Image (cartoon, rainbow, N blue to C red):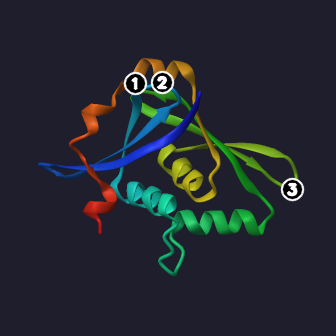
Amino acid sequence: MNAHIEGVRVAETASGLAAVVTLGVEDDDEVLPIFIGVEEATSIARGLDATDIGRPLTHDLLLDVMEELGGRVERVVVSGLDDGTYVADLHLETPRDEAVVDARPSDSLALAARTNADIEVEEAVFETNREPLDEYDELDDIREVMA
């Protein structure tokens, strides 16, 4: 299923901030929530906003190295759930061939946000784990909290 980053949000909890990225799909009011680290959420938001902070952070560095070597991010696929943890595949085009790399969804989405690469979610993953978007309406956009 074609997907997009619907939002990157955070909530205050007893143990600190908790972050979630929500993936939306076309013609559906529900989202796939993926709980991630606050640093990864910040990186995704920076990628969406094309924020340049000067020196490259890890996702910027990885992308710079990949591009310097002639590769590019083709697409990201959230492909499964393994023992409660989402799994993603990072599809790359390289000078040698196409490659698929196992990656965390948060890292993959941070790269997709920087490259406008396609984002996909396996239909079974979405159907099994979808939730109403309004369950996340009260959470703060991470850009507001980290500003």
Q: Quadrant of residue 43?
A: bottom left
Local secondary structure at mark 1: loop
Amino acid type at image mark 2:
Phe
Tag 3 or tag 1, which sits nearer the N-term?
3
**Helix, strand or loop status at disc 3:** loop
- Work out whether residue 108 or residue 116 is closer to the camera in this orientation and state it: 116
Q: Please give the label number shown on residue 130.
A: 1
Q: Quadrant of residue 71?
A: bottom right
Residue depicted at x 57% and y 67%:
60
Name the residue located 47 percent from the left edge and 27 percent from the top edge: 81
In the picture shown, does residue 10 fall above or below 22? below
Q: Residue furthest left?
A: 14
Residue 105 against residue 130 in the figure, above or below: below
Looking at the picture, which amino acid does disc 3 mark? Answer: Pro
Give the residue pinned by disc 3: 95
- Whether residue 134 sits left or right of residue 111 in the image: it is left
> Whole-Å distance between the Cαs marked 1 and 2?
5 Å
User: Which quadrant would the N terminus be assigned to in this image?
Assistant: top right
The answer to whether mark 1 and mark 2 are in CB contact below 8 A is yes
Height in image: 6 above or below 124? below
